[in-house]
Image (cartoon, rainbow, N blue to C red):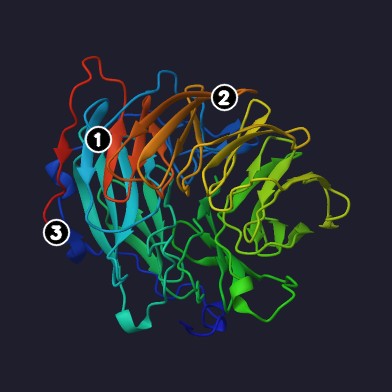
Amino acid sequence: MRLSPLESFEQHTYMNVTASPRKNRIVGIPASRWGHAMTKPLSIALLIGGWFISDVAAADDWSQFRGPNSDNVATQASDMPTTWSESTNVIWKLSTSRTGWSSPIIAGDLAMMTEATSDGTQMYAFAVDLRDGKVRWSRLVFENDKDKLGETHVMNSYASPTPVTDGKHVWVHFGSYGTACLDVETGDEIWRRRDFPCNHFRGPGSSPMLDPAGRLFMNFDGYDFQYVVCLRGSDGSLIWKQNRDVDYGTTDGDVMKAFCTPIAINVDGNTQWISPTSKAVIAYDPNDGAELWRVHYDEFSATGQPFYDGKILYVNTGFGKAKLYAIDPRGSGDVTDTHVRWVAEKGIGSKPSQVFYQGLIYNIHDAGVLSCLDATDGAELWSKRLGGQFSASPLIAGGLLYVFDHDGTGYVIRPGRVCDLVAENPLDNGCMASPAVFDNSLIVRTKTAMYRIGKLPDASSAVELIPGAE
């Protein structure tokens, strides 16, 4: 699918931006039915792990892909579950009828996600009350002409990018099919844009990032166009756009596509936006999009999100055989030969992002081998074959490591320099989305349901809650 030329949005910055809610598209259960009120306190801007939590969202909100610090570490969790099944330690279960691999995000007592019909003609956002698992609101955000939709890979969906929230607004993103800002409490639309051309070729995958200044940062790395944009989160207007300037070594657009979610890091008091693509990772100045530095590599279709330990940046290079690069981000220009500290090549997962915790890196290969690397030099300390296929990113919460496979097994491991498998827990279906953490419980999205998993004193049975009429 080749959309309108890229120049169609360079000439103006407000195309398809609307200021009024589209209340005629309310689907499902209206917000007023549940009468919910936010109860968590607001936080001031807080520097954690080299980056800032939003000065609007609560400090313990799971506000974006892989949590508030983009690292998949829940620092405030303390008493997490280790065992569960369909009949034990499930606080609630909500069946879902549409498809979506986007991960749940959390604002207050609400979890929000996106989903789509299997053919991609309708794209939705919905919010669930985390206290009882009931749908608070559901919105049909975009409709598409079936004949103009591009294909998706069997491992992807039309609703794979994860939303981002500041506690008051939620930005939902479906790649080139559209981006919209909604009200967290009601789901009412504030603005929308559908004018960013990109043939994702295998479906959209990159999630948006929001910084404390309210700027929305998005990657568009497609078969035809490759660029990054920065928007004002308040109204969707364009602040800047930068075309990728990468030597892909081919004219085959399949090698140019990528699905990475960017991150922001704080380097010596200055913010860098880190944006991997095929064949390179590039650091941008968030103020004007100027390139700060880059590192080249051989792999393409980068998918895993980078992570940062406060000194070293770690970048997953993608397919065919993924590598993990450790990079000193204090350079300028092409630093491939000067600032790469080590490269790990054995058993690195392509789709799941890695997680850093207490000097160690935990990595799950797509084909089911879990490994632990020493962050100082990338040396493998141990590996264990779990079996199955994996797309969801590993999570650290309450001092435990959680990994979920495609078939429904959730593994619990005690982190450390030796492998300590605590439990294997079955669910009816498996995960493509990465889990979130809420109040010492796991929010898990499988292919067919959403769960809140937590310790129950009486190990009571799960209660299945069916979403409201559509």
Labels 3 and 2: the sequence-earlier one: 2
Quadrant for the N terminus in the image: bottom left
What residue do we see at 27% from left, 53% from top? 187
Find numbered disc 2 in the image and state the secondary structure of the residue it sits on.
Answer: loop
What residue do we see at 38% from left, 46% from top? 431
Labels 1 and 2: the sequence-earlier one: 1
Q: Residues within 10 Å of mark 2 (few under 14, many from 20)?
A: many
Q: 323 and 19: which one is in front?
A: 323
Q: Which residue is mark 2?
A: 415
Badge 3 vs badge 1, beta-carbon distance below 8 Å: no
Labels 3 and 1: the sequence-earlier one: 1
Q: 51 and 22: which one is in front?
A: 51
Residue 154 vs residue 140: left or right?
A: right
Q: Position of residue 332 (x, y in %)?
A: 83, 54
Q: Position of residue 55 (x, y in %)?
A: 50, 38
Q: Mark 3: which amino acid?
A: Glu
Badge 3 vs badge 2, beta-carbon distance below 8 Å: no
Q: Cα distance, mark 3 to mark 1?
A: 24 Å
Q: Mark 2: which amino acid?
A: Pro
Find numbered disc 1 in the image and state the secondary structure of the residue it sits on.
Answer: loop
The correct choice, above or below, for 76 with respect to 133 in the image is: above
Q: Which residue is mark 1?
A: 37
Residue 388 vs residue 239: left or right?
A: left
Q: Mark 1: which amino acid?
A: Ala
User: How many numbered discs, if any?
Assistant: 3
